[in-house]
Image (cartoon, helix red, strand yellow):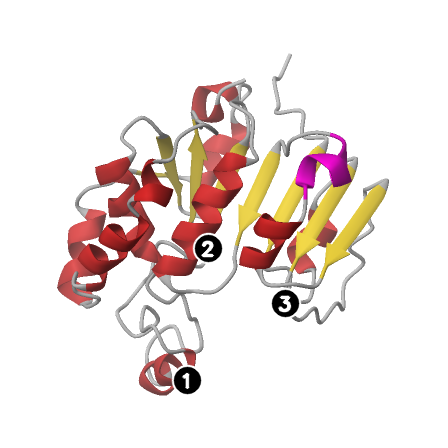
Amino acid sequence: MSRARDSKRYLEVGVSQGHLMSQIHTRTAIGVDPSFDITFNVSHGKTIVTLVQVPSDTFFAEYDYAALAGGPPDLIFLDGMHTFEYLLRDFFNAEAIASDRTLIVLHDCLPLNAEMAERNAKVSAQLGVNTRFPYHWTGDVWKIIPILQTYRPDLRLVYVDCPPTGLVCVTNLNPASKTLKTQYFAIVDAFRALGNDLPAIDNLYGTIDITPSSRITNDHDLTLYFGG
């Protein structure tokens, strides 16, 4: 008998048109985006859907996820602003409202070239137009990986090859941890100085093992990767 994660409560940061949210089956889903452009049926497969049109910083500061959803999120998908300092804030704010069994999924952290990792979306599009991957913008959110490796070695990170630019799945969360929040400015200063070029990205890939998504989706026990 297969064992799957029982996700009744979902949080998505960076909903945009709602394509991903429309594919999620859960009881309660909350989506956060400063400017929704919904073109998909985000209510599909759900009982309750709440869309909160504010920046993620505002959501975490002013809204009570547990009160809105009836408990902590089981699954969180972070796909907000594509610069590492924004994702860092989204991550530690999301972890603070999680439980110890929540799965946090980070999008676009495995860039395929330096052009898509450019911090400015317009510059990235200009540089990448004649590459193999035009108009794929990840920004420099890949830096969240060495940040978590350095400051939160207690976390379990699984790197998945979902196209085009991967997923990082994070478990073994500690909602009480203040490490990333209290050291936020020091971390930002240190990793702003880290290169955002091809050698730096190549170095990233030398520090991680990537798991094929097919192995996870075909396995009979997801707890092997993400816990219970």
Residue 187, relative to residue 227: is it above or below? below
Q: Amino acid at mark 1?
A: Lys
Mark 3 touching mark 2, by CB under 8 A?
no
Dot 2: within a 10 Å radius of its alpha carbon, few (fewer than 14), some, or many (20 or more) residues? few
Residue 124, relative to residue 85: is it above or below? below
Farthest-out residue, bottom: 126
Q: Nearer the viewer, residue 18 or 180?
A: 180
- Which residue in the structure is indicated by mark 3? 34
Q: Nearer the viewer, mark 3 or mark 2?
A: 3
The residue under the point 55% across, 20% down is 220
Q: Amino acid at mark 3?
A: Pro
Using the numbered discs, state the Cα–Cα distance from disc 1 to disc 2 in whole angstroms: 22 Å
Residue 5 as seen in the image, left or right of residue 147: right
132 magenta-colored: no
Give the magenta part as a residue range. 64-70
The residue under the point 54% across, 23% down is 101
Instruction: Of the two numbered discs 1 and 2 on the same chain, state the one appearing first in sequence.
Output: 1
- Which residue in the structure is indicated by mark 1? 122
Dot 3: within a 10 Å radius of its alpha carbon, few (fewer than 14), some, or many (20 or more) residues? some
Q: Nearer the viewer, mark 3 or mark 1?
A: 3
